[in-house]
Structure formats: structure tokens, C-alpha cells
Amino acid sequence: MQNDANSPQPIAKSQILEWLQAVKDPEIPTISLIDLGVVRGVEVDAVTGKVSVHLTPTFAGCPAMDYMKRDVERTLLAHGVPAVEVEISMREAWTSDMLTEAGRQALRQHKLSPPPVIGNQVFDLDFLEYAECPNCHGNNTELRTPFGATLCRAVHYCHDCRQLFEQFKPV
Amino acid sequence: MNPTLDLLYRLADDQLILGHRNSEWNGLGPILEEDIAFSSMAQDKLGHSLQLYSLLHALGEAEPDTVAFTRNAPQFHCCQLVELPIGEYDFSLTRHFLFDHAELLRFEALATSSYEPLAQVARKLRGELKYHALHANTWMKRLGTATDEAIERMQRSLDFTLPYALGIFEKTDAEAEIISSGLFVGEDELRGRWLESISKVLAQTALEVPDVLALTPVLGGRHGQHTEHLQPLLDEMAEVFRLDPTADW
């Protein structure tokens, strides 16, 4: 080992973020954890090169969190990051507005309707009932049940193309 | 007991026990959507209990699994409402409606708790609880305006469940300090908001709402006094865990 004199520079944060783009939601393989908005922070220790990643769950009871945590660790270690620490907390609680535009597109690709952007508006029942059909893109839709195949999905029906479809829920 | 621990144990135990009860609808729901709904709400509630037990752990209490799976009924602080067997669907729906309205309002209030770790969790859970309240409202309104049989059954369930629901708001010795320290607005205030909230929905049904505050609440749960239904539930829930508490899952 002779890396004392020119020990490797810590990896740039932008590089870490690029690698993390490859880590997908295990249940929706078209969307990355970054575009899902569950990666709330990345820090690189300037001395040791250790990378700390802060994750927050989309839903408190999400059973995929441990898997996501291990996937982040595995991916960064495989790229040669010397040490990885993943913290899961609700310091910055996830809301569906944290989905990026690329993330919304990735959901559509998976035939999931992305949640409406709430912004500063009052989050009332109208938001829960509204969804755009991922098949015909119409708005003539109806909430059938707020609970679907996973905690983050609701089931709606499109009156235009007469199809049931799933929506990634607004919260 | 320290007011923060007192409050957290009540919140967490309610979630764990009702979560377990909701899961008993898995495979038995009257229609597929309701099977999924109760199973999803069970998963949410178990997730919520884990967040709250984790706050307790951070304050020096045992690991969440240990707390959830190794205590016996007298050490539980849940209200008796949540431990009752699932019964028929009309009862489970009525319990879900009465409990989750209180729950949504409770976590909305806790979002500004002086105890910041609890406020953070509350800000997350209240968004999820909106779906529980929405679901309950939909079915209360649908069945509460349906056939004579549906209305009669819902009325019977409502009359039976309301005294237990009042037990949600049972106070402990820590109440005064919980309010004065800004941890929570308090059970009386919450009960007032709850009554207003459920009344609005019930007014859209054919159901008759009795003078709720004149009813005799079923108390005791917050002080470790439970029905005969809780211990068998705990035994079943912890059966696998107790085979080998050190097993790594």
C-alpha cells in the first residue's frame, strides 16, 4: 500500500448521485430512488471518503426500506466507495411532491398514474380522488379504492377507455 | 410514568393491536377490495407502531420487537376498543370509522407537538391516515344509506361501539403535564374535535346518533385493564417470536 502521499481524492457528490440513479425502487423498476424523492441527502466525508446517505420512506410501513438500504450500500461499495452509511429517518418526511419530473415520467412508463402536484394548496379529499389515466391520459376517472397492491398505490377507473388503473398516491 | 413515555405507549399499543386485528380480515373480506383495504391498513398501522416504538427505544426503552412481543396484557396501554375481535364486517367497519377519525385528528394535533421527534413522525402519519378516514367515510355513507338490513346492522354496531370508542380518550395521571408541556392538546379537546368530525359524516346517513357524551365510556385500557380478548391475541401474535427471540429475520 503506498497511497499515503497521493491518497485518492474523495469521490465527488455528483458522481455518487449518478451511481445512485442506478438504484431503482424494487417494486417499480422504472424509477430510481433519487427520482422517487426518498434520497434526502448525500454527504461525502472529505477526509475518509465515507459516504452517508439519508433515506426517508414513502409510507411509514413500507416493507421495501431495508431492501433499498442494502441496495444503496451494495451499489456504492461496488463502485469502490470506501465506506457507506445509510440512515433512514423522517426528519424530512416524504411527500408525493418530492417526485421529480423524470420520476413522474418513469411512473407513467410503468403504467402508474403519477400523483397530482399539491404545492401550497390545501391537501384535501379532491387530491385523493383525482387521477390521470396512464393509458389514454384522460381525466374522466373515478377513485375505486384508496388501497391497492402496495401501500403507495390506489385503484382508479377510467370512464373513457374503461380500464382500471393504478395511481401512485398523493400524500 | 414520564409523560412522553406514557403518551407514546398509548399511541403505539393502539396501532399494534388494531393493526393485528385488521390483518385478520386478510383472505376473509366481504369483497376483494375490502380484503385489500383492511390488509393495507393493517400494514400501515404496524408501520406506525414501529415508528412509535422506535421513538420509545430512542428514549431508553427496549427494542421495538421486544416491547411488542414480550409483554402481557396488563402491561399494554391500548384502549379496549382496538382489542375486540373483528366480529362481523359491520362492527369492524364501525370501529375503523370511529377510531381512525380520532387518529387522524390526534396526529394532526401532534404535528405541532413540543417533542420534535414525535412531531416529525406525526407529520408523516397524518397524510397516510387521510386515506383511512376517506375509506371509512365512503363505506359508512354507502352502508348507512343502503338497504333496511344494512342500516339496521350499522345502527346496532354504532350503538355497541360508541361506549368503547369513548375509551380512546381515557386520561392517565400524566394528562395535565402532557398538556402543559405542549406535548399534546389533551384527550378532552381531541374528543370534542372527534365528535364534530364523526357527526358530519353520520349526518349524511340514515343512522341515528345518540347523545354521545351522555354514554358511559368503557375505560380501563390505558391503565392495563383489558377484556379477555387481548391476551389470546398477544399469544397468537408473539407465538413465532417467542420460539426463538434471538432469531435473525
Image: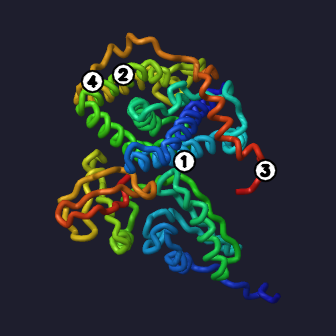
Chain bearing mark 4: B
Q: Distance between the residues labelled 1 and 4?
A: 33 Å
Amino acid beneath label 4: Leu
Quadrant housing residue B211: top left
Q: How far apart are marks 3 and 2 (CA)?
A: 46 Å
Q: What element carries label 1?
A: helix
Report which residue position mark 1 lands on.
B47
Q: Which of marks 2 and 1 is nearer the N terminus?
A: 1
User: What x and y, as percent, mark residue A41?
Assistant: 53, 64
Report which residue position mark 4 lands on.
B207
Visible residue check, residue B120: no
Chain bearing mark 2: B
Q: What element carries label 4?
A: loop
Report which residue position mark 3 lands on.
B246
Q: Which residue shows up at 66% across the image and 70% down it?
A: A84
Q: Distance between the residues labelled 3 and 4?
A: 50 Å
